[in-house]
């Protein structure tokens, strides 16, 4: 158990809908990262938050957004969902936010299926 | 441009065989970190090791060992006396200097199947 908690574990929704994925980082970790894992794109970094502020952005679509709350949990919002958004979404956390952040520990992922 | 290549898509071995998973990386930075993660059939990503670019010492942890060679931009992973529980997809990853170590460029992964 990495200590990173993601909910829900599975989500099935229809095209055009909006969903919210939730992540609780390990106790004491200030950085949260979101990744998408799909068969065609592999594991892709989406976005990082550090202590409530956006720190780095990767290949995140404009339809997707994230935030980190004062209690350090994070949410990834996916809107106007398309079939191609079906994927495993991972959250990870690390102690700090910069190059000395320490390694990232991943949650178990949320399996999103868009039908 | 930064890139991680895991040329072996799938490897199948019989229990107790040794197996090496290859990883080649590209980066222009002189400071970077390399990682290996394991993804068992249950789906979670499990951290295995981190190595920084200034430390080329090989590392051994039980049946696992890692060989980092800057001259060939490789960071290979060897499992000695493989076991069925080692069956998983293994990912090599890179984080470049200045970026957080959770901001990772992953390879496509190598699926290892260990048969009894």
Image (cartoon, grey):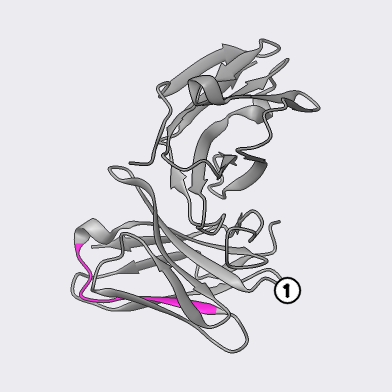
In this rendering, would B38 be left or right of B2?
Answer: right
Rendering quarter of residue A71: bottom right
Residue depicted at 41% across the width and 39% down the height: B28
Q: Position of residue A40 (x, y in %)?
A: 27, 42
On the question of residue B39 being in view, the answer is no
On the question of residue B45 being in view, the answer is yes
Question: Start and end of the magenta stretch?
Answer: A74-82
Is residue A46 shown in magenta?
A: no
Q: Position of residue B1 (x, y in %)?
A: 33, 41
In this rendering, would A103 be left or right of A16?
Answer: right
Residue receiving disc 1: A28
Tell me the quarter of the image containing the N terminus of chain A. Answer: bottom right
The local secondary structure at tag 1 comes to: loop
In this rendering, would B28 be left or right of B113?
Answer: left
Q: Position of residue B71 (x, y in %)?
A: 53, 21
Single out the residue that lies furthest toward the front: B30
Taking depth in this image into account, of B53 and B36 the one nearest to the observer is B53
Residue depicted at 66% across the width and 57% down the height: A102
Is residue A80 shown in magenta?
A: yes
Single out the residue that lies furthest toward the bottom: A70
Residue depicted at 67% across the width and 21% down the height: B79
Q: Position of residue A109 (x, y in %)?
A: 50, 59
Q: Crowding near pointer 1: few (<14 within 10 Å), some, many (20+)?
A: few
Single out the residue that lies furthest toward the right: B62
Q: Is residue A79 above or below residue A82?
A: below
Q: Is residue A38 above or below residue A28?
A: above
Tell me the quarter of the image containing the C terminus of chain A. Answer: bottom left
Q: Chain of mark 1?
A: A
């Amino acid at each position: 158990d990495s200590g990173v908690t993601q909910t829900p574990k599975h989500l099935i929704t229809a095209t055009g809908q909006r969903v919210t994925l939730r992540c609780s980082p390990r106790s004491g970790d200030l950085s949260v990262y979101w990744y998408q894992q799909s068969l065609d794109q592999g594991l892709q970094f989406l976005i990082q938050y550090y202590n409530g502020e956006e720190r780095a952005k990767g290949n995140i679509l404009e339809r997707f957004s994230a935030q980190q709350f004062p209690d350090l949990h994070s949410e990834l919002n996916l809107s106007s969902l398309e079939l191609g958004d079906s994927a495993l979404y991972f959250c990870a956390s690390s102690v700090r936010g910069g190059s000395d952040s320490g390694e990232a520990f991943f949650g178990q992922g949320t399996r999103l299926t868009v039908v | 441009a930064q890139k991680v290549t895991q040329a072996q898509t799938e490897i199948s071995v019989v229990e107790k065989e040794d197996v090496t998973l290859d990883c080649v990386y590209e980066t222009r930075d002189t400071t970077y970190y390399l990682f290996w993660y394991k993804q068992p059939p249950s789906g979670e990503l499990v951290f295995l090791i981190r190595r920084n670019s200034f430390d080329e010492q090989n590392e051994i942890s039980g049946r696992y060992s890692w060989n980092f060679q800057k001259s060939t931009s490789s960071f290979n992973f060897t499992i000695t006396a493989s076991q069925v529980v080692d069956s998983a997809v293994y990912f090599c990853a890179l984080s470049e200097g200045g970026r957080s170590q959770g901001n990772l460029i992953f390879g496509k992964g190598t699926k290892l199947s260990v048969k009894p």
